[in-house]
Image (tube, rainbow, N blue to C red):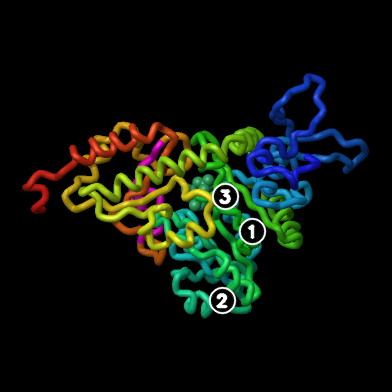
Amino acid sequence: MADSKKYGINTRAIHTQKKFELPTGDVMPPLHMSTTFENTEPGESEYFYGRMGNPTREIFERTIASLEGIEDYENMHGFAMASGMAAVTMIAELIEPGENVVITDEVYGGTTRFFSKIAPKRGIEVNFCNFYDTDKLESLINEKTKLVWIESPSNPNINLYDISSIAEIVHRNNSILVADSTFSTPFITRPFEHGVDIIMHSTTKYIGGHSDTLGGVVVTNDPELHENLYFVQKASGGVMSPFDAYLAQRGLYTLGPRIQIHSKNAHELAEYLSSSKHIKEVKYPGLTDFKNHEIAVKQMDYFGGMLSFYTEDHIDKQKLFDNLDLYKLAVSLGGVESLIEVPSLMTHDSAAGTDAEAPDDLIRISVGLENIEDLISDMDRSLNASIKSLDESKK
Ligand SMILES: Cc1ncc(COP(=O)(O)O)c(C=O)c1O
């Protein structure tokens, strides 16, 4: 797309890198399954071998880089991996034994598991930190700190960090800032605009958008990091399959409009929950009384589709899950359907006993694209039907 710079983000999602000449005149790019590509002379082939490159994966890797704001997306493309965790471990390959990483104590449970159980075995020191305590953050960064890692909004507490201020601290100390932007996507926050050096997404979530593809992607705006990550991608080999890349790319076409509806639905549900006598506290960036609302206004284009809450003690949570019709009790997020879960027992069970463990009673919802009136009335009916009996309340 020669004029990519002048187009808006939705146009880029649909038109980036769709130039190919097929005799059939396809309007949409085909799925390339071939694992090997013919050479013109030994060693001369654009894609060469499926792990090194694949035309379907390439379209996705270029489009996501363009959406994150990279103008030279053909060269500075993203790196599509087999899962979000494969993207996490790919970035962690940049850390040498003896170096350290500082990570928020509010990250996805699988990321906590990797950094607390696997990274230390490779001689990497890992320090979890509450990033609101910027003095502590600064004291943990030293000349051996390779990466500083944030997730904003955080999973599952939906806390937000002022990314520009964190980037300022990290760069002042010559380290690299990584943002897991899975909850945001480029349609909500573009972390490079706030000083982040490496962005990653689990494409299993909003980017794929239909709970039917597993993947991850890494994007950087730094040429040296790009070269190093490219080497890790092809040498370590946990790449995204062509079919998953096809689905992830297809997800990008509708990501903008989906994010708008996810955000509108989540905002209305959050307002309903805040006003309910059955709910103790709601965490949603769009609520004006939410503690990080000002940061949200500063760095989010929409407030997103994720919210968390605590029920009052008189609600029987198991009954609530049983009574709900439209919210499935399941892990994951970002699909068209609404999902409800208990992070401490489900997505974050592996973080139990670490600094990053999820609060016991917190409930998380990934708000889907259903009619919001239906989602609210299903929740209202279920909450009213899940009140503990007097005997149960005394327990
Ligand atoms: C914020 C975040 N990052 C990373 C991951 C890991 O992604 P995957 O499950 O695709 O490996 C998840 C999964 O839930 C996530 O929520």
Left or right: 393 as drawn, with respect to 257: left
Left or right: 276 as drawn, with respect to 93: left
Nearest the eye: 302 or 106 = 302
Which residue bears the numbered disc 2? 141
Q: Residue at x 49, y 75 (%)?
A: 134
Q: Amino acid at mark 2?
A: Ile
The span picked out in magenta is 338-352
Q: Earlier in the sequence, mark 3 or mark 1?
A: 1
Sort mark 2 into few (<14), some (14-19) or many (20+) by Cα contacts within 10 Å.
many
| Coordinates of residue 386 in the picture (x, y in percent) | 19, 41
Mark pair 3, 1: CA separation: 14 Å
Tell me the quadrant of the picture where the N terminus can be found: top right
Q: Which mark is residue 201?
A: 3
Is the residue at mark 3 in contact range of ligand 1, meaning its CB lies under 8 Å from it? yes
Nearest the eye: 129 or 96 = 129
Q: Foreground mark, 2 or 1?
A: 1
Instruction: Indicate yes or no whether the magenta region holds residue 80.
Output: no
Is the residue at mark 2 in contact range of ligand 1, meaning its CB lies under 8 Å from it? no
Instruction: Indicate yes or no whether the magenta region holds residue 346.
Output: yes
Which residue bears the numbered disc 1? 192
Q: Amino acid at mark 3?
A: His
At mark 1, the secondary structure is helix
Q: Residue at x 50, y 41 (%)?
A: 260
